[in-house]
Amino acid sequence: MGLHVLVADDEQPILDELVYLLGRDERVSQVRAVGSGADVLRALESDPVDAVFLDIAMPALSGLEIARVLARFRTPPKVVFVTAHEDHAVDAWDLDAVDYVLKPVAEDRLRESVRRVVSARSPQGQAPAGGEEVVAVELAGVTRFVPRSSVAYAEAQGDYVRLHTTEGESHLLRTPLMTLEHDWAAAGFVRIHRSLLVSSSRVREVRTVSGRCSVLVDAGGPPYVELQVARRHTRDLRELVHQRARVAGG
């Protein structure tokens, strides 16, 4: 059975577009649309859904407020935020959102959100049957599957991220860096800068010079790649690297 989803946005043209695009996805069997946060709650009283695609900036009840209410349901639907603003991303992840999509939404980006909903509802999560998670990247019409374990760091480039691997290759992926930060945290990836996410297992040195912190990352070297660490992320980086070192040492 396909997904039953509810879409909420107070701007009718955007609402119509989301309904149309979701209706084209073969994994979605039913799409309902409402124009306010209050209407979300009324709709769910009569007909539960698998996922709710929420605008954040809605009058009266915001998408974040609605998500907090949904989290108290016995079986809460998966939540995907669809918004024009990046500044609520941290709040969204605190609410355990499956995805955070920026407007205007491209069809392939919305399909990725649906994939995340399907994956989050399955007992296996996002890992494939073989155990090793892979990332599908495309170049000139060819899809390649890159093992996540080979990714040394990811660098934000507009609506994309560039994955830098230990083979010295790089691949563009149409996924916001904040989404990777959320999805890959359990695999040891940590944000070190607004535009950089690194695999803690690939960090070879943490340096502090004149109060400025940087890391040397194994991305197919030596020489290793030196990346600057923003002050606000220094503590989290050090704690994660030390934690993984303790685990590796038994």
Image (tube, rainbow, N blue to C red):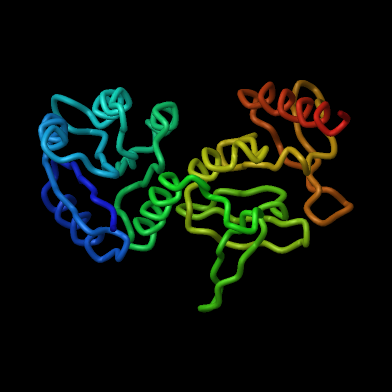
Front in this rendered view, residue 186 or 150? 186
Q: Is residue 68 left or right of residue 202?
A: left
Query: Which residue extends farthest bottom?
Result: 141
- Residue 221 at x, y = what percent? 85, 54
Q: Is residue 174 left or right of residue 163?
A: left
**Residue at image coords 30%, 66%:** 26
Above or below, comparing residue 207 to residue 227 in the picture: above
The C terminus - image quarter? top right
**Residue at image coords 19%, 55%:** 30
- Residue 178 at x, y = what percent? 50, 41
Front in this rendered view, residue 207 or 6? 6
- Residue 1 at x, y = what percent? 29, 58
Front in this rendered view, residue 85 or 246? 246
Above or below, comparing residue 151 to residue 198 in the picture: below
Q: How many marks?
A: 0
**Residue at image coords 65%, 62%:** 146
- Residue 200 at x, y = what percent? 73, 38
